[in-house]
Image (spheres, grey):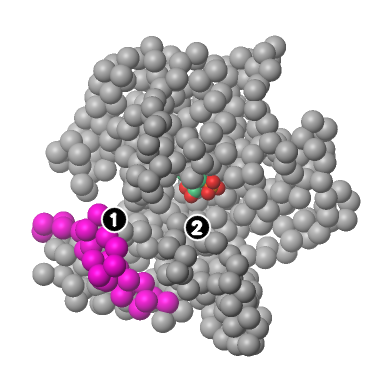
Amino acid sequence: MTTVDPAAGQAVYEADRAHVFHSWSAQGAVTPLPVAGAEGAYFWDYEGKRYLDFASQLVFTNIGHQHPKVVAAIKEQADKLCTIQPAFANDARSEAARLIAERAPGGLNRVFFTNGGAEAVEHAVRMARLHTGRTKVLTTYRSYHGATANAIVMTGEPRRWASDANVSGFVHFWGPYLYRSPFHATDEAQECQRALEHLENTIVFEGAATVAAVVLEPVVGTAGILVPPPGYLAGVRALCDKYGIVFVADEVMAGFGRTGAWFAVDNWDVTPDLITFAKGVNSGYVPLGGVIIAESVYETFRERPYPGGLTYSGHPLACAAAVATLTAMRDEKIVEHAKWLGDAVIGPGLRAIADRHPSVGEVRGLGVFWAVELVRSKETREPLVPYNAAGADAKPMNDFAAACRARGLWPFVNMNRTHVVPPCTTGEEEAKEGLAILDEALTVADAFCG
Ligand code: PLP
């Protein structure tokens, strides 16, 4: 139910501007929309304007807003026991770990809980280094791994640049991306083979015996929704086995239903040594993340203490939300629905949109994880805005986003792309409504084509 109370919205806005320091922003430039409430795939402001959320906030409300079973589970847990420190055993924590392990591929069976994705990445790196006795970590350009000390340096996109100084041991390589192939490949098989050769060369030239981990997003998220060609992840697994390297799949964004499978690696039947997760595990109702650990790595820490911990590791409120989320996702077949929505509605809908608009260079994705890549020309593939564009250079994408919002669609926009990443629970009619708005708003982008 929408709320109409502009005065309350104004007060929220003013207190925010007076006191809240915002992420990733010049503080004088932010104008946050005050949000009054949300349900399912929608949220609304204090003017009563509703938005269909094609961004799932920051790609985490996989189960939609205010799922009644998750809300009830948090309330029940709050009545029972709000908090308990991590050294004790707790029923919500035990059950969340059991449900996560039950869904994990290849018998990965142990869970270390964190408060979010970046911490999960930090701990996966620490585990890999101690397990191998090596230090170097290989990650891809076109990746995001979080904003803590190591995770931001592992990141491959411009958010890393300001934090790059004085950190060594992190090496970037190119992953597959056929539309803008770093390997001049002309088909997926060639892209796959050349990307694997490039990774092997990187490992060998860095000194294989110095490399602790290869960390990658099995389907790259924020940096482009890059779906790997068949055989790529299996090839990475084989290279890690060959050189004794820990394979870490960062599933913070891709995990828990987003790709139409519990984990993105399930789409290719590949088992990493460590999986990092957060976001969809409980749709962010209470902050939670973690690392799912293979027995081989677990064995390293059977006798030897693991040198790491967090005050709120496995917080009962967050774990109760995870138990309810994972149970509802199974009972309501939400992962299956996400796959169906991608195959039957979003994929075909976006391909039809691509045919109609000169500004759409490529659409790609799976499940509820899609990118629409905007270009000046389909022939040259010149991006609609330059890499990392800001200010006037970003106008075409800013105008497109404004056209979406004016029509009641909240888009996810990154560089020259819009990502179609609604909740896994989005209904067929809702998805079609969003695609229709996207279709209209793209005429704004078309006007910038040469
Ligand atoms: N890893 C990936 C793949 C992500 O997409 C993100 C966040 O978007 C993170 C790590 C960092 O997660 P958090 O923001 O919870 O620290």
The quadrant the N terminus occupies is: bottom right
- Write down the region rendered in magenta: 379-405
Q: Is residue 234 left or right of residue 85?
A: left
Magenta highlight on residue 392: yes
Residue at 41% from the left image edge and 81% from the top image edge: 406
Residue carrying label 2 = 23
- Classify 324 as above or below 29: above
Residue type pointed to by label 1:
Asn
Which image quadrant for residue 95? top right
Is any atom of residue 243 visible in this view? no
Q: Label for residue 388?
A: 1
What residue appears at the point 29 percent right and 16 percent down from the top-left corner?
A: 204
Q: Quadrant of residue 86?
A: top right
Q: Position of residue 448 (x, y in %)?
A: 18, 72
Mark 2 Cα shell of 10 Å, populated few (<14), some (14-19), many (≥20): few
> Which of disc 1 and disc 2 is earlier in sequence?
2
Task: Inspect this view and state whether residue 349 appears.
Answer: yes
